[in-house]
Amino acid sequence: MKWLTLLFIACTSFALNAQDSPVVYSVDGPVRYSPASKGWFNFSPIKTGMPLSKEGRLKLKAGTSVSVLYDEQFAIINTKGKHDITTLLADYEQFQESPYAELLQERVEEASDPFFFFLDDEPGLAANTKPTKPVYESKEGDGHGDADAALLPITTNGGKVAGESFFVSWAPKADVKVPEQYTFRLTDDQGQVLLEKTTTEGSLTVNAADAGLQTGQFYRWKATASNDASVGTPLITFEYVDETTLNSVLSALKSTSAYFTAGSSAKRLLEAVALEDNGFQEQAGLRFREAMEQDPDHDLARALYKAFLWRQGL
């Protein structure tokens, strides 16, 4: 079975409550759905991300399937015929517990805030109707949420880093003129400069060997406008860890049936929430972005990425 995408396509007025509404997790084939409000026989194609009415029904052809997330568990329905949602939910044996389903649901519930689902380019929506951004509780000791910083760090924004190279990126605040050139500096925890580069882009890839990074050590990076050092990011601290630590997180996820049967965008989102939960902020951010870029119409992927940036104090 090919899983297409994850969970739900939400509007700004919808908030997920997994205890009340099962949510379409994936669809394989022309599965159809009829909510009670539209009549028992008014079936229409089901979409990934659709919240299902308990009074509704599903209609599956041979070889088709639909997966739902409900109460921090998931189930795959692949039997030909019509299925009452209430009956499906009462069949507890078909639902599987998964720590990843629970973790993802937490992120989805957070991302269901109307602010994260606001579409900036939606026609006819007045600027003053934009939902209020949730209050952010800043983190201590790593520069997150620095309101005075002219440049905002996107990745690597703290946490753990592993691998032969890692990606760093930043962006000017809305009221800051874009510098013509940036200077990037990487230092050890004593302030000694290990690597310095200039770039016209708001990003670059750092080679761990070139910088002499050692497993288990903490490092800091900062980007500034080359012609004005006062225009810069906060000083970001991260830990460089052995790549086996990162691989073990992904291996545990990839051994699950939820991941094994997932489509490309779904895998990126599952990887993102697992990596973020284990402190790999840079890798999580990249995967949230990949999921969003792979499917530009995937509103949930966009919302999850926005919520991730918000958690980073951006």
Image (cartoon, rainbow, N blue to C red):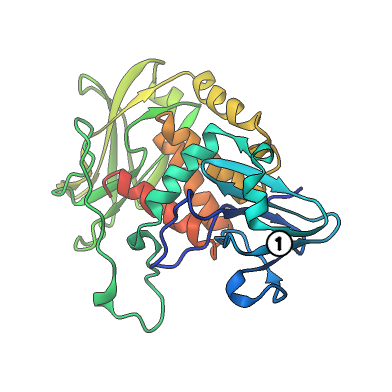
Q: Does residue 26 appear left or right of residue 121 in this picture?
A: right
Pick the front one: 7 or 252: 7
- Residue topped by disc 1: 58
Where is 50 relative to 18, above or below? below
Q: Is residue 206 visible?
A: no
Q: Residue furthest bottom?
A: 124
Q: Does residue 144 appear left or right of residue 77 in this picture?
A: left
Q: Count how many numbered circles sit on residues in the image.
A: 1
Q: Residue furthest right?
A: 62
Q: Is residue 163 visible?
A: yes
Pick the front one: 287 or 256: 256
User: Residue 75 at x, y = what percent?
Assistant: 66, 44
Which residue shows up at 25% across the image and 56% down it?
179
User: Residue 180 at x, y = what percent?
Assistant: 28, 57
Where is 228 relative to 283, above or below? below
Q: Label 1: state its secondary structure.
A: strand
Which residue shows up at 67% across the image and 52% down it?
87
Name the image quarter holding residue 128. Answer: bottom left
Where is 193 relative to 81, above or below? above
Q: Amino acid at mark 1?
A: Leu
Q: Does residue 4 appear left or right of residue 230 in this picture?
A: right
Pick the front one: 112 or 202: 112
Q: Does residue 35 appear left or right of residue 214 in this picture?
A: right
Name the image quarter holding residue 236. Answer: top left
Which residue shows up at 55% across the image and 47% down it?
70
User: Residue 138 at x, y = what percent?
Assistant: 20, 41
Mark 1 surroundings within 10 Å by alpha-carbon count, few (fewer than 14), some (14 through 19), many (20 or more): many
Which residue shows up at 68% across the image and 35% down it?
257
